[in-house]
Image (cartoon, rainbow, N blue to C red):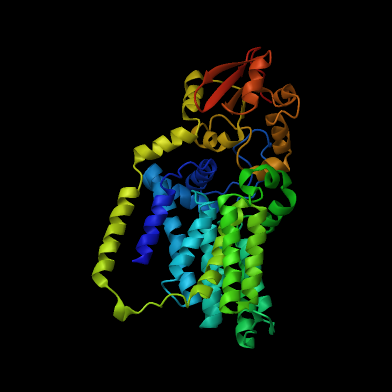
Amino acid sequence: MLLGLLSVLAVLTVRSRFDDPDMWWHLKTGQIIWTTHAIPTTDVFSYTTGHHPWVPHEWLAQTLIYGAYRFGGYSGLMLWLCFFAAALLIAGYALCTLYSGNAKVSFVGALTIWLFATAGLAIRPQMIGYLLLIVELLLVQLGRTRNPLWFFGLPLLFAVWVNCHGSFFFGLILASTFLGCSFFRFRAGSLVALPWEPRRRKMLALALLFSAAALFLNPVGIRQVIYPLNTMLHQSIQLNYVQEWMPLQMNGARGVALMALLGGVFLLVAVQRSDLFLDEMVLLAMGTWLAVGHQRMLFVFGILAAPVLTRLLSTSWDGYDAARDHPWPNAILLAMSVLIAFWGFPSRQNLVRQVDEHSPVQAVEYLKTHSLSGNMLNDYVYGGYLIWAAPEHPIFIDGRGDVFEWTGVLAEFGKWAMLQSDPNALLNKYKINFCLLARTSPMAYVLPLLPDWKAVYTDNMAVIFVRTTGAISSR
């Protein structure tokens, strides 16, 4: 019954989230892989990077996303999102139940995961990555409390994970953290470390070695394995200026929720005089550090914090007793859950409307009907949709910040878009003949003031400018 309620919550949460700008280039990449049976390892969407080498670190997830579209169009994509959102909450509930031993309190843990996951629920590969993170925690918990053979599910997990999302690197750190904490024995107030038996520890270490080897089962090799490190160390512009990578606003709703959860955990430890285990403390510290530094990491924080919270709350509510269950009320609630989920699933017309409200659909139609030629400069957030809807026009930039930062394009575009450089310098360097920009972007107010540019199309979303002095030959 509780799983039914979590599924309904997932559907109602994501039904209006068919608007992520990065969804489109993930979808297009998946289409290329599906139709050509080849994984692109260079940039094939833009003309500004010169086909620079690219790491297809999410190719398997992108193929699954396109498979959902091929199966059911927009509705197939939304079904994909509903499925993985529900799977995340259900897997999180299973993890909290296993960890706390209380099937009722674990519902609070699943709601905790939901609360912080709302920062990143979208049709993107990270949905699969964070689901696999929960599966990893399940395998580790089963291995250390039941049969250690469960640890040997980790290599297979990482072989899939490395081809779906860069969070595999954090998963490897997480498993290593459990292994490291398993050596300690001490008590410092409420902080407790309990060592594992040697055999169990050795089996986790062996599973980790196999997992590290499994990371190389990818189409790129070492570059794909170290890609997450490259992101953290060599993509400073993306980390500092892209919204989801910015630090968490502590006075915002999610910042307050994070502090409240941490405060609640330590209050429970103090009031109940409960033990807080070393690995729990380390995981909470890691999750908090990541979430405070980058908003998108709230997803990870919720997954790491939920089991700890439910263990501390496990004695506050009676555990599940099948003898006291109420089958018919539960059956009615399950039936209602199915009906509400069916009712809440958006129609195709609703999905089309969401696309119209968040993407430059009409501006792309203008491009197609008026045959604009030459190099295009597009707004950053529109690049993904243009890759999907107007592939005949190579884009200037899109949400793949990595390849554009490596080639210097992101830095140039950032200065241009924020009016920190001569507008004509970039327009002339890349021989731009027309621009498709968000109507509210700063450059949308500057271009009409330049002598060689005029607006030829505008709507509530976008504006198109063309060069009036004649087209410049493309490079």
Q: Which image quadrant for residue 352? A: top left
Q: Is residue 216 above or below residue 422?
A: below
Q: Residue at horizontal 62%, vertical 50%?
A: 251
Judge by depth and name the residue closer to the eye, 441 or 105.
105
| Farthest front residue in view | 271
Is residue 7 left or right of 397 when viewed as pictured? Answer: left
363 relative to 348, above or below: above
Relative to residue 464, is residue 283 depicted above or below? Answer: below
Residue 180, horizontal then vertical, whole percent: 68, 76
The residue that appears at 65% across and 20% down in the rendered structure is 447
Q: Position of residue 32 (x, y in %)?
A: 52, 44
Is residue 306 among what the camera can see? yes
The residue lying toward the viewer, choosing from 276 and 357, is 276
* Residue at 40% over, 35% down: 353
Query: Where residue 91 appears, x then y in whole percent?
Result: 46, 66
**In which quadrant will I find the N terminus?**
bottom left
| Residue reaching furthest to the left | 328
Q: Is residue 146 left or right of residue 184?
A: left
Residue 80 seen by the camera: no
**Image: 308 above or below 300:** below
User: How far from the left and from the top, in percent, is residue 431?
Assistant: 69, 23
The quadrant of the image that shows the C terminus is top right
Q: Quadrant of residue 164?
A: bottom right
Side of 440 relative to 321 (left or right): right
